[in-house]
Amino acid sequence: MKPVIGQGGGIKTEERQNTRMHRRELKSTVAIRVRNVSKSFPGVQALLGINFELLTGEVHGLVGANGAGKSTFIRVLSGASQPDTGEIEVQGSPLLFEDPRLKRSAGIAAIYQELTIIPEMSVLSNAFLGMVPSRFFFTDKRRMERRFVELSNWMGIHISPHVNAGTLSVANQQMIEILRAVQTDQNVLIMDEPTAPLGPYERAKLYDLIGRLKESGVSIIFISHDLDEVLKLSDRVSVMREGLLVESRRAANWTKDALVQAMLGDVQIVPSMKRNYATAGELLHVTNLTLPGRLSGLSFGVHRGEILGIAGLVGAGRTEVLRCIAGAEPSVQGSMRFAGTNCAWPRTVREAIGRGIVLAPEDRKLQGLVLSRTSLSNLMLADLHAVAIGPIIDRKKTSARGRTLARQLRFNLERLDTEALNLSGGNQQKLVLGKWLNRKPKILLLDEPTRGIDLGAKQEIFQAIRRLSDEGMGVILVSSDLEEVVEHSDRVLVLARGRQIELIDGREATVERILNLIFAVESSVTESGET
Amino acid sequence: MSDAEALSSGSVRQTSTWRALLPTLIRVYGIILTLVLLLTVVTIGNPAFISQQNIFNMASQWAPAGIMAVGMTFVILTGGFDLSVASAYSLCAVVAAYVGQSHTPSIAFAAAIAVGLLFGLANGILVAVVRINPFITTVGSGFIINGVALVMTQNAAFLVDNDAFGILGAGRWHSVPYSGMLLVTFFIIFGFVLARTIYGEAIYAVGGNYEASRLSGIRVRAVIASAYVLMGGCVGLAGSIAASQLSSAQANLDPGIIFDVLTIVVVGGTSLSGGSGAMWRTAVGLGIIATISNGFVLLDISPYYQSIIKGSIIVAALALDTGLTRLVRAK
């Protein structure tokens, strides 16, 4: 089922086995050594005298809050940007800072946090982007296909190489990114939050893959906000804070709490809030929600002040449920009761907003924000009439309202005039939320509100959400992070393959129970031969 | 993202704010520097450049292209493009001249503006509702409009023998040209609309991120279509002014004017990808293009060199802008 790499019968098999053996000889040597690397951007010192060692065949976890400098650090390592001072040695020879192509020949491949998939090209072309195997001047498509099948079997993924990459789910796109990095057969692999878009099932596959890469002698730098995952996978873990590499220890010598303390420095973290089960009346009830081909026959309700979590694997239809309720899917079928009266299903986003149902979408940059505009503009976007006199926008009102919202969300007031493009993920998410809080919605639909953002910002966002739900707002929460769903939801709706599996009381929900429910369905479907 | 994130991270220590601000200032206002430089060079070369009469003449001469640049700024900010303006401009002028032969000038100009709005609406519906690529839509509609003008005129010039018809384009109030006043008024009114109104904010939002705007409840299709309608209105007025200035019009009045209009908007620094730019930028762009063209005449530069110099200045201005942007965003 999962052949070891190199046994797939590809043309380069012998060659590759040789490189693997070569790697084994290098074991216990240093793959990358970083000495005193600093880098600043106009106005910001992003890296400050970083010293770092990556051993051959080790998985090295790298953690830190947003803006700690992790991304800048890996960009420097992978050659995407140049350090101001300091030096980097790869396998003992200094690295020249030119372009990523040269870096590739130095044996380093990186998977960036932002996907670099080209949506209009096929999966196959994306997997071999920039390194198309060729015979004379022609691309060798047969070789590409063979290698693709070999690698995807090895990785345990099943994606057709001929569909456009843009049609894949974000999780599968991420798997293609990983495949692209793996296929170059590098000695060092840098992964910047590779698990952020993945559900539990895909994550398990990736952990497995990392284990096998490590066995074959590849050194891996692994960045993630999921500390359990970092501790589980890594041999050593380094913590970054404010451009400094604060501490490196063997993973066994870290605990989750110690990591959090090191990441946050002196900042205290607030323990998660007590659950407050909803007893008030039902605000929204949907019956027989069906989206042809995606969802079938879901029925559930949301009470005033309740947070309803939706749990499921990637592709289970979580996002679709939210989009249907938000009026973004015109082909939806089903009936809706809102605030005690039957009403027509909203067919446009404007209709839903008119009723007080709003969506904070999955992809902050593509669906949530106008990146070229300021934070303030983005906060006002959904309710411009509230800060205008007739058709003319009142600057005083805008500024006053923006400040109030920023304080509610603990958004830095000085960043209100910054373009959204220049904000960290956590701050961007606060804007997406703030945009809707401005309208005082009755139902808030949250799709992956904490993807890729740091602990501090996560806490602030959930505090804001809980405060609002205490005031009577109903919330539906979708997240790939099951722990988060369990921790914050009053009830959990479990989905698999577009069907409703169960609606669990939040006090009885555990990650284990939810996963068991989901995998029971997944395995029965696989056994019956469905794809 | 990582660089930008690092840039924005509040927790990371600050270096000198002055050094940080300078490139941003140059990027935002550098285009004004270019204009001032050009004005200085041309004035030194021939002081007649800043004479009141020359300035007023320029305002009148550039009124049609400038007014169309106002509309084009809206279209480009929504992430669109309108290549049909050259044909539509000629057709509107032809309509004004044709109607002006038998009716009063105000009816003639109203007819021209109505025709402009109508074709603008057609472009808007095709781009925003049918969702055809704006480039293709307007190339196609440009051909159609040009054909209509040719059929109407049989490629002959329409002459208008009525002094009142010439007032809009060539008339003056105490030596200030009406057309120049209209130009300035358009810039002020639509500059205000863009910068200070709900509609202006929606134009930026739709061009910056269509999906986010839709999910925020903005009427995205109406907003995009309206930009083309506004463009059409501007084309109608520009055509009227041109017909009035010449007291005549023909089907191929000035096919090259599309390049002037686009260059004015883009040189000012409004991004072709939509969502970023401003009306004052278009005003500065107009100043730059008008100064270059007028400077050629005043400095008596051989026409053979004119296009080389004009092209070089345009490319240099854009290269400067892009280079500085990169310096600021992702060093």
Image (spheres, coloured by chain):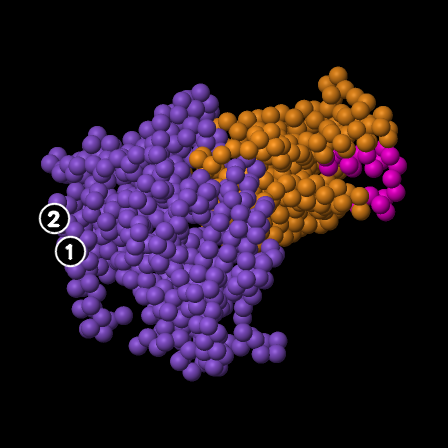
Chain colours: A purple, B orange
User: Which stretch did the figure color magenta?
Assistant: B288-307
Q: Is residue B289 something that shows in the picture?
A: yes
Q: In terms of sequence position, does the residue under pointer 1 or pointer 2 come before the other?
A: 2
Residue pictured at 47% horizontal, 69% vertical:
A26
Residue type, label 1? Arg
Residue type, label 2? Glu
Q: Quadrant of the C terminus of chain B?
A: top right
Mark 1 belongs to which subunit?
A
- The answer to whether residue B291 is magenta is yes
Residue pictured at 40% horizontal, 38% vertical:
A427
x, y percent for residue A496: 22, 59
Task: Work out whether B279 lies above or below B85.
Answer: above
Residue pictured at 68% horizontal, 41% vertical:
B320
What is the quadrant of residue A365 in the picture? top left
B258 or B157: nearer the eye?
B258
Asked if marks 1 and 2 touch (Cβ < 8 Å), the reply is yes
What number is the disc on residue A513?
A: 1
- For disc 2, the marked residue is A508
User: Chief secondary structure of the magenta span?
Assistant: helix
